[in-house]
């Protein structure tokens, strides 16, 4: 199926929840391989002078709401956010009362054991899912109770996703995969193609534009996924274990890329990772446990955060 046919099918049968589910399953917005990686050991050091000035003191408990620590309203704010699932007669809380504020330009790392709620939290911040209870503000707009079509629009404009399993559409070539989010934003084909070529140039894949995902290596697929995440120039990049399955060279490349995005373009980066090198870049590290925020560490250039689990 060609790109135009896929888009056509999605548009003519436009049913927001179906589109969202279809995207979750096929287009990279769902972290299928949910394994937690154990930090890579690339051992390479990356210059990291992007730390924000002290971003406030550690928050010790998830019941503490961190009110605008720098006087600017936060880009993202979660208030008493719960995500519960019914399991037979009982309810299971994947997230249990999350309070968190994230400022524009932060590099936030989310750490926690498998099953602690990291991906659930990312899905809520990324407008892929709605909380069972609580409020989420994105750019001061309450997204917790929006209809799916509106949620999809905000997601398309504001969020770039990079997930471990890439989720490229196998029947689309590299360029078409990168153009996919632009299609949903109704960017015209000509401009879309130019932007896709520009982004693929940035990630070093200009010579692979016509390749299908099956004709790419794992590292190259991840680079296509990164180019796609930047297609609509979103202010927020969400990455769930982006270097988990990669060789250290590609992992290092992606690390540098995220660092540049943050430093040079002031993108807000929120990343689930156990990669020690990425943790060193963080402005704050949020520790999740059993669906709650256990602690939040602030990091500085002189005192970078480190893994501790
Ligand atoms: N759709 C679902 N239905 C029931 N339980 C779920 C669902 N999604 C996630 N969970 C549970 O919620 C908890 C948190 O999951 P997740 O956010 O994926 O954790 P992490 O990403 O930290 O490994 C896990 O115990 C998981 O089994
Ligand atoms: Mg996960």
Image (tube, rainbow, N blue to C red):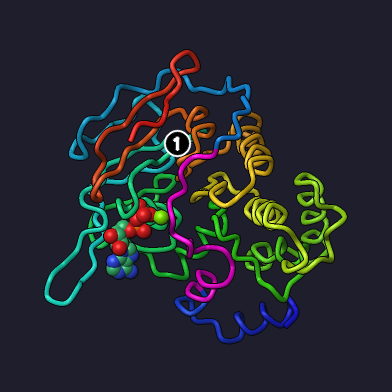
Front-most of residues 239 and 237: 239
User: At which x and y percent is residue 209?
Assistant: 83, 61
Quadrant holding the N terminus: bottom right
Dividing the image into 4 quarters, which one contains the C terminus? top left
Is the CB–ligand 1 distance for label 1 below 8 Å? no
Q: Is residue 298 above or below residue 156?
A: above
According to the image, label 1 marks what residue?
A: 108
Q: Which residue is drawn at 59% across and 29% down?
A: 43
Indicate whether 299 appears above or below 278.
Answer: above
Report x, y in % for residue 143.
37, 57
Q: Give the range drawn in magenta.
A: 20-40
The answer to whether 187 appears left or right of 30 in the picture is: right
Residue 78 horizontal/vertical position (percent): 31, 46
Residue 2 placement, left or right of 72: right
- Determine if the magenta segment contains residue 191: no
Residue 38 place in picture, x, y as percent = 46, 43
Does dot 1 land on a helix, a strand or a loop? Answer: strand
Identify the residue shown where x is 42% and y is 48%. Answer: 138
Residue 66 vs residue 245, the one in the foreground? 245
Q: In this view, does 189 lie above or below 75?
A: below
Quadrant field for ligand 1:
bottom left
Q: Is disc 1 surrounded by few (<14), some (14 to 19) or many (20+) residues within 10 Å? A: many
The single residue placed furthest to the top in the displayed view is: 302
- The image quadrant of residue 214 is bottom right
Please tell me which residue lies in front, 29 or 144.
Answer: 29
Q: Is residue 67 above or below residue 146?
A: above
Q: How many numbered markers are drawn?
A: 1
Q: Which residue is rendered at x = 25% and y = 50% of the image?
A: 291
Left/right placement of residue 191 relative to residue 156 reads right
Identify the image quadrant of residue 7: bottom right
User: Residue shown at 50%/49% (left/top)?
Assistant: 241
**In this orientation, does residue 143 appear?**
no
């Amino acid at each position: 199926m060609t790109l135009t046919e896929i888009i056509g099918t999605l548009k003519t049968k436009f049913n927001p929840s179906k589109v969202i589910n279809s995207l979750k399953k096929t287009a990279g917005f769902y972290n299928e391989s949910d394994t937690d990686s154990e930090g890579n050991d690339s051992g390479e050091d990356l210059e990291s002078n992007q730390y924000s000035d002290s971003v406030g003191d550690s928050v010790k408990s998830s019941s503490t709401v961190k009110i605008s620590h720098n006087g600017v309203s936060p880009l993202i704010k979660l208030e008493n956010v719960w995500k519960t699932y019914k399991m037979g007669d009982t309810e299971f809380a994947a997230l249990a009362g999350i309070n968190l504020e994230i400022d524009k330009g932060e590099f936030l790392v989310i750490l926690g054991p498998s099953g602690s709620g990291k991906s659930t939290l990312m899905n809520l911040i990324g407008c892929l899912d709605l909380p069972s209870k609580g409020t989420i503000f994105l750019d001061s707009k309450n997204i917790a109770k929006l209809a799916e079509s509106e949620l999809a629009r905000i997601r398309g404009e504001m969020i770039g996703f990079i997930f471990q399993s890439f989720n490229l559409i196998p029947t689309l070539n590299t360029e078409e995969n990168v153009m996919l989010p632009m299609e949903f934003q109704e960017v015209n084909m000509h401009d879309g193609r130019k932007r896709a070529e520009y982004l693929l140039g940035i990630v070093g894949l200009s010579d692979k534009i016509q390749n299908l995902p099956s004709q790419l290596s794992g590292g190259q697929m991840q680079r296509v996924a990164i180019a796609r995440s930047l297609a609509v120039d979103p202010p927020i990049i969400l990455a769930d274990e982006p270097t988990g399955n990669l060789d250290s060279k590609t992992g290092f490349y992606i690390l540098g890329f995220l660092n540049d995005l943050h430093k040079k373009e002031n993108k807000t980066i929120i990343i689930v990772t156990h990669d020690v090198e990425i943790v060193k870049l963080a402005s704050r590290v949020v520790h999740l446990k059993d669906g709650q925020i256990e602690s939040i560490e602030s990091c500085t250039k002189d005192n970078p955060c480190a893994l501790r689990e």
